[in-house]
Image (cartoon, rainbow, N blue to C red):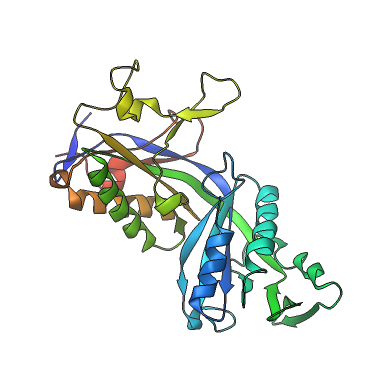
Amino acid sequence: MTALVLNGVTIDDSFAEAFTMKATRIIVTAHNLTWARHAAVAATGFATSVIACGCEAGIERELSERETPDGRPGISLLLFAMSGKELTKQIERRVGQCVLTCPTTAVFAGITQGESVALGKNLRFFGDGWQTSKVINGVRYWRIPVMDGEFVAQETTAITKGVGGGNLLLLATDVDAALAAAEAAVAAMKRLPNVIMPFPGGVVRAGSKVGSKYPALGASTNDAFCPSLVGLVAKTELTPLTRCVMEIVIDGLTEKDVGDAMRAGMDACVAIGAAGGLLRISAGNYGGRLGPFHFRLHTLMGRSGT
């Protein structure tokens, strides 16, 4: 194995193992960007991992008036789930509870190609018979009376195949260094389209491994990367200098989107370098046995070693 060291940071000869998921994009607009963001934040809450949340969701980007169907400020959201059935359920619940309820909002499909599923189709019944519809250029929209006027919702959106579980593990000398690297990586990834980092701030400290000593749990703490367990576990990935590890999980609409985001994140981390306290970049996988997408770190960086 040839070592790859960039700006003092060791890049592991490893890969992130990712999975096929179902995905959609929805667009939330409002009277101004503040209220569009309120709805977007609520709709993507409690959506960090399909392990317990049902879906993984996040804000993709802000949209100007020129980019939205109704000419108002908006937010683009991406949602991912393990099945189309679960994603359809999550869309309806999150839009119904978090977008319909938020002042001045409207909701539209952000993807047109794929399996058609309900967006406003069932939410219209909240109108108690007063709801009306209009077809524009072959697309049906529902107008639901609410106390600030009306809630406009496109009847359907589309779901398509996506990729979930791309990841980076950032090993650093302390919490400050790990957070600085993680924040820089997330900021670089957010400049790219078609991806989200679903955990809070895009970063997760509670990385997991498959299995547990407790039969009821399917996942448990990734003890090989826990600094407090060095010397206590049979196998550790850490040296005495490594006192903090942060993980970034990436979901994207395509394999290329996830790979591009991982590369952008690693470039940002390498720019910080060992002088900033970042020691090593690794990734989580299951030996290649479970996920069809293998994002090899050395290949992404376009290097064979230095």
Q: Give the image quarter of residue 44.
A: bottom right
**Quarter of the rendering occupied by the C terminus:** top left
Q: Residue at x 56, y 81 (%)?
A: 31
Count of labels in the image: 0
Dividing the image into 4 quarters, which one contains the N terminus?
A: top left
Location of residue 233 with respect to 115 vertically, above or below: above
Give the answer, above or below, for where 77 lies relative to 238: below
Relative to 165, residue 231 above or below: above
- The residue nearer to you, when weighing 175 against 55, is 175
Residue beneath the point at 35% across and 50% down: 262
Q: Is 201 displayed left or right of 92 in the figure?
A: left
292 vs 105, nearest the viewer: 105
Between residues 162 and 152, which one lies in front from this camera angle? Answer: 152
- Is residue 21 depicted above or below 76 in this figure? above
Residue 57 placed where, x, y %? 54, 54
**Residue at position x 75%, y 66% from top?**
123
Looking at this view, is 44 or 154 the one in front? 44
- Name the residue at 54% across, 74% down: 35
Q: Is residue 223 visible?
A: yes
Report if residue 266 is visible in the image: no
In percent of width and height, residue 52 lies at: 59, 40
Q: Residue furthest right?
A: 129
What x and y, as percent, mark residue 23?
58, 54
Which residue is the extreme one toward the front?
A: 147
